[in-house]
Amino acid sequence: MREGTGNNFMSLQFAAKSENEAFARVAVAAFISRLDPTMDELSDLKTVVSEAVTNSIIHGYDSDPSGVITIKVGIEADVITLVVEDAGRGIEDLELAKQPLYTSKPELERSGMGFTIMENFMDEFEAVSEPGGGTSVRMKKRIESKKALYN
């Protein structure tokens, strides 16, 4: 994530295994910690990482652990750009998938709120998907802490 991502960035790839979801949350939280986010901001960011990674595992790769998930994070002043990508099966109808309570896996008792949560917890949200070509979720959030204003 170098293009237009600001003065600091990181990229992380890992197997599409459910046990790696917690790792992804902690890795992103550790990377952005220098901005001194509030507990609410940190909780929001960890939640959207969890939702995006879980979507990739369950929907993108149908829980196939051979899939790879990529997370990219960029920091520019007080704004975090977060991208979560997979090369999984993609989404047939992205607008339908963004509807609250919609899930393509009702047998797994999924809530269907992943995209809604991501959109509501972040300042900017964009999802791009191509059937058979994977999904990319790009989000931005401004950190309000005083420390972030001086970095």
Image: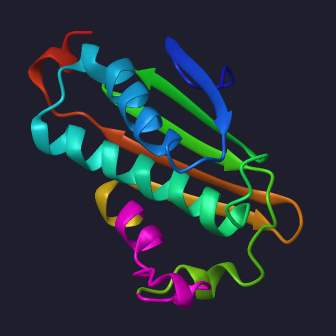
Q: Is residue 107 above or below residue 5?
A: below
The image shows residue 57 at horizontal and vertical percentages of 62, 57
Residue 9 visible to the viewer: yes
Is 8 one of the magenta-colored residues? no
| Closer-to-camera residue (42/142) | 42
Q: Is residue 108 above or below residue 55?
A: below
Q: Is residue 130 above or below residue 20?
A: below
Colour scheme of this structure image? rainbow
The image shows residue 8 at horizontal and vertical percentages of 49, 13
- Residue 110 figure quarter: bottom left
The image shows residue 17 at horizontal and vertical percentages of 60, 47
Residue at image x 47%, y 69%?
Answer: 115
Is 111 one of the magenta-colored residues? yes
Looking at the rendering, in which quadrant would you find the N terminus? top right
Residue at image x 87%, y 60%?
Answer: 133
Residue at image x 40%, y 81%?
Answer: 111
Q: Please count the marks in the image.
A: 0
Looking at the rendering, in which quadrant would you find the C terminus? top left
Residue 77 visible to the viewer: no
| Closer-to-camera residue (63/126) | 63
Q: Is residue 144 left or right of residue 87?
A: left
Read off the magenta span. Answer: 101-118
